[in-house]
Image: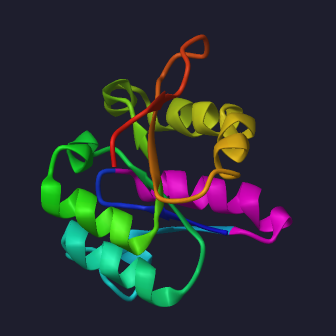
Amino acid sequence: MRVFFDNCTSPVLAETLDGYLSHRKSSASHIRDLACGRHASDLEWMSYLAGTGDDWLVITGDGRIKDNKAERAAFRQAGLKGLVLAPAYQKTPINQQASFLMWRWPDIDILLRLAPPFLFEIPMNRHSGIKQLPV
C-alpha cells in the first residue's frame, strides 16, 4: 500500500509516516515528490494515482472533496481510499499532528480492510470516533 498526502497537508507528515511504514513494506509520499507535481489539481492527482495501478490511501486536509461532485466522481472512479484530517489538525503544531496520526494508525489499519472507494474523517480527539463521509 502507498499513502498519498496532498497539498493541504505538510510534507513533514508524509516523511514521518514513510519512516513508520517502510518497515511494513509500504510507503508515504507527498504530492510534491510525485510525477504529477505539486501544482496538479485534485482531478489530476486522482487520475495520476489511478493510473499507477497501486493501492493508494489518500490523506488530505481538504474536506471539500466530499462536496464537489466532479471530485467525488473522480475519487470513486479511481477506486481510492481516503482520510480527511479534521479542521483541528490545521491549528495543531506539526509534531502533534504527526504523533496523533501515528497514534490512530491501528484504527486506520482496520479501515484499510474495507473495499474502496471510501472516505473517512479522522478527528483530532482520541475519544472521538472516525466518521464516514459520502463518496
Q: Residue 103: x and y, percent?
A: 69, 32
Task: Look at the image and say whether residue 135 sits in the magenta stretch.
Answer: no
Residue drawn at (39%, 30%) of the image: 89
What colour scheme does the image use? rainbow
How many callouts does the rendering have? 0
Task: Look at the image and say whether residue 15 sits in the magenta stretch.
Answer: yes
The front one of 93 and 70 is 70
Q: Residue 85: x and y, percent?
A: 41, 37
Q: Residue 18: x and y, percent?
A: 65, 62
The front one of 18 and 131 is 131
Q: Which residues are magenta?
A: 9-26
Residue drawn at (52%, 16%) of the image: 125
Residue farthest toward the top in the current orientation of the protein:
127
In the drawing, does residue 56 fall left or right of residue 51?
right
Against 104, residue 48 (above or below) is below
Q: Residue 69: x and y, percent?
A: 15, 55
Q: Quadrant of the N terminus?
A: bottom right
Where residue 49 sits, quadrant-wise, is bottom left
Residue drawn at (57%, 40%) of the image: 98
Q: Main secondary structure of the magenta part?
A: helix
The front one of 72 and 26 is 72
